[in-house]
Amino acid sequence: MAKAPQTAIQPTRADDYPEWYQQVIRAADLAENSPVRGCMVIKPWGYRLWENMQRALDDMFKATGHQNAYFPLLIPMSFLEKEAEHVEGFAKECAVVTHHRLEPDPAGGLRPAGKLEEPLIIRPTSETIIGATYAKWVQSYRDLPILINQWANVMRWEMRTRMFLRTAEFLWQEGHTVHATSAEAIEETERMIDVYADFAENWMAMPVIIGSKTPAERFPGAVDTLTIEAMMQDRKALQAGTSHFLGQNFSKAQEIVFQSEAGEREFAWTTSWGVSTRLVGALIMTHSDDDGFVLPPRLAPAQVVILPIYRDADQRTEVMQYVETLRNELMAQSYAGMPIRVEVDDRDVRGGEKKWHHVKRGVPLRVEVGPKDIEKDSVFLGRRDQPKSIGLPRGEFIATIATILGEMQQNLFDRALKLRQDNTVTIDNEADFRAFFTPKNEEQPEIHGGFASCYFADEASIDELLKELKVTIRCIPRDQDAASGVCFATGRPATQKAIFAKAY
């Protein structure tokens, strides 16, 4: 029997996908668990990636007329109580501050003291505190629209955590807007889900499906929730961003009232939308392989790493002069409208170890330069999306680097799209649905399932089946034929198709 090829990450995706995911994070040095249960320390390479995501998204938000602001971390409990559905949706996830100081206890430790008159909630999301602020800002139709985003952290007391995908504290952005009409608010909701889809596909190289959540899956208190759903390499779905049309629910709860042009007193229409550090997890599970992280070039903290190779001090002087010139020439080039990001790794580490360090971190291009390369005025180029390295004349490499990075970005998108296409099926009966979502090994499930496109009549009639199979309705795709069909489970007439999947 042929021996399995050695991989940098153990176990492999096929052997144990959840553990593979954790090992990629560790090998790429992205993050680690913190002393606080369910929280993580984002390490410099992971945070640089998040900063690149922030910058790209922030530019997109500002290009659509939004401004950044900041609102308090602590929310009075009474604010959440004003919107019943909202508080019910988040009640079990809230971290509560009940005291405002510490004092020594008889055992020599510390204990809470100074009980607050009203408990404060560490924000799980900010609709209520921001709504209370907007109520002071809005008096007239002339004050509208308000288009604001904030970059912040939030706390949701998760019991089962996984780094980047689901942690008690995470980083995100949350947009909150106020409008004079329902039509304007709906237009904003749709605009922002399109911004997220643009970012996912053109920056993350991650194909997504845009659609609406069903009533049971909507954001608590929303009239409609739009989502982008992506398929990970284990064929599970990941909700990668949401945009919520809140109607007048929060404006009525928070008294966001304005005088219309006609002089009438009206409640405003609001939206909210957000993405989080969960997108880092999405990148890992969309593109990475059994040798580690694979980064799309547009978001990579370093797009090129140069690895000098030399034996002695004389060679080092010659090689480093060449490397410095090469670095400057590369940084003078641009890709996707920005200068190429280049690092030089001159650490006193063995060449093989150094190479695999950057393979596991997902750097798109590795460039090895030694005395023999200098003689030929060439470089030895390794692409993270291809297994073999090649020699290339230096001038050709510099002239074509933007093209190479563009090819890599497209390759990653095409691979992810093919995976989704190959694992998306249309199902019209319960037997096939069960078979699709049932693993051969129930105790240690293998990678199975995918996206099932099915007509369904209503959520209630299929709820028990979905719970049994641990499947959810991911979304009702925005782009679908108007034709009607038959519910796959009940046989009743149905007018809409949904994407069903197991999910994170």
Image: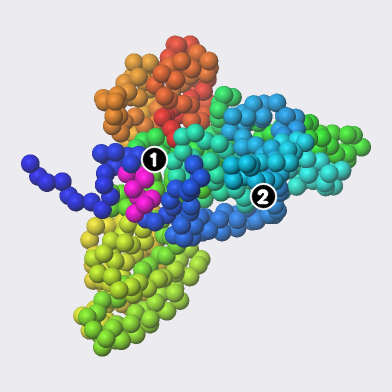
Give the position of the N terminus as an image quadrant: top left
Taking the view exactly as shown, the residue that stands out farthest to the left is 1
Can residue 339 be seen here? yes
Q: How many marks?
A: 2
Please tell me whether residue 21 belongs to the stretch shown in magenta. yes
Give residue 394's quadrant in the image.
Answer: bottom left
Q: Position of residue 421 (x, y in %)?
A: 36, 37
Residue behind mark 2: 149
Residue at x-position 38% and y-position 26%:
426
Mark 1–mark 2 CB contact (< 8 Å): no
**Amino acid bearing label 2:** Asn
Residue at x-position 49% and y-position 33%:
159
Callout 2: helix, strand or loop? Answer: strand
Callout 1: helix, strand or loop? Answer: loop
* Left or right for 444, reference 151: left
Disc 2 crowd rating (10 Å Cα; few below 14, some 14-19, many 20+) is many
Q: Is residue 371 above or below residue 205?
A: below
Please tell me whether residue 396 belongs to the stretch shown in magenta. no
Disc 1 crowd rating (10 Å Cα; few below 14, some 14-19, many 20+) is many
Residue at x-position 73% and y-position 41%:
114
Tag shown at residue 295 = none
Front residue of this view, candidates 34 and 211: 34
Can residue 485 be seen here? no
Q: Position of residue 48 (x, y in %)?
A: 49, 60
Residue behind mark 1: 232
Label the magenta part by its dominant secondary structure. Answer: helix
Name which of mark 1 and mark 2 comes first in the sequence: 2
**Amino acid bearing label 1:** Met
Front residue of this view, candidates 147 and 125: 125
State which region is magenta: 20-27
Taking the view exactly as shown, the residue that stands out farthest to the front is 106
Taking the view exactly as shown, the residue that stands out farthest to the bottom is 314
